[in-house]
Amino acid sequence: MDKQDRLNFKLGAKQQVSGNFKFYLLLSILWMAMQWIGGSMYARDMNWAERVLSDGSATIGWNGFFSFAGLFFLVASMLRMGVRLTMIDLDRGKIEANNPIQRSFALFDKGQYFLGWIFISILTGIFVALWSLLFVFPGIIKAYAYSQAFFIYRDAYDRGEKMTALQAITASRKLMDGNKSFLFIMDLSFILWFMLVAMTFNIAGLFVDPYYDLTRAKFYNQLVVRQQDVPGGSQFTATDHDSEN
């Protein structure tokens, strides 16, 4: 993939979100709301801790020891993954742009989706953390290498193939070979958009977040298509047994 591919992904995603903004907003609004609530709760708890450490004037209560912020962030991650699955299917023409709120729960459409996401998230988190112990850059590289694991897992399941979380991670590492820098640069190209989101107190995120997620969905779909077009290339299946390290 090259610069023109990156421009095409972004232009296509921007046009789709702009042309059907209401759908993409409603599709993404739940996870954005959960993330906003979690962020607000986290900021409140950090302020509480600051007051305690500075002058000890705050009264210690249950809110100081336990926060639901992490729970809201977890729910936001689940809903966002459902949004990304929906965007992948929309880009493939498998589904229609309707019932946005319902489609945001796509991760829960099948129990195997949810379980796969849980195990893949745990394993990738462990692997990235271990690589980060060497230095921050190996961790970043591996995070990009494993970034497509759940999408590969979901596709394999939909084809009726059995695939473990570890096999999906290994398949992602292979699929991203030679494409990690492309995705990294594509993410960096959104930096001004993310700055705009910060400056507008997340209001711009109502457009930017769906735009970013749809761009990534287009990247994955094209990655799979091109893998199939490579001589000797094929769908990743559970027959890939390379160990991960």
Image (cartoon, rainbow, N blue to C red):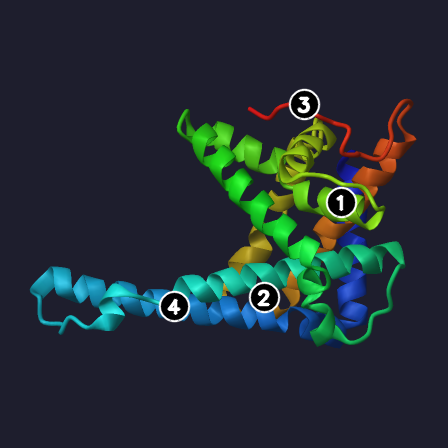
Q: Nearer the viewer, residue 113 or 16?
A: 113
Dots 3, 2 in contact, CB < 8 A? no
Crowding at dot 1, Cα within 10 Å, few <14 / some 14-19 / many 20+, comes out as many
Looking at the image, residue 203 sits to the left or right of residue 12; the answer is left
Q: Amino acid at mark 1?
A: Phe
Q: Is residue 190 visible?
A: no
Q: Amino acid at mark 2?
A: Gly
Specify the label residue 205 is tagged with.
Answer: 2
Secondary structure of residue under mark 1: helix
Real-space Cα distance between discs 3 and 2?
39 Å
Query: What residue sits right under mark 3 in the picture?
Result: 242
Query: What residue sits right under mark 1 in the picture?
Result: 219
Labels 1 and 4: the sequence-earlier one: 4
Mark 2 or 4, closer to the camera: 4
Labels 1 and 2: the sequence-earlier one: 2
Labels 3 and 2: the sequence-earlier one: 2
Crowding at dot 3, Cα within 10 Å, few <14 / some 14-19 / many 20+, comes out as few
Labels 2 and 4: the sequence-earlier one: 4
Specify the label residue 74 is tagged with.
Answer: none
Q: Nearer the viewer, residue 157 or 37?
A: 157
Q: Residue at x 78, y 76 (%)?
A: 99
Q: Is residue 104 visible?
A: yes
Labels 1 and 3: the sequence-earlier one: 1
Q: Amino acid at mark 3?
A: Asp
Query: What residue sits right under mark 4 in the picture?
Result: 68
Q: Position of residue 11 (x, y in %)?
A: 79, 54
Real-space Cα distance between discs 1 and 3?
25 Å
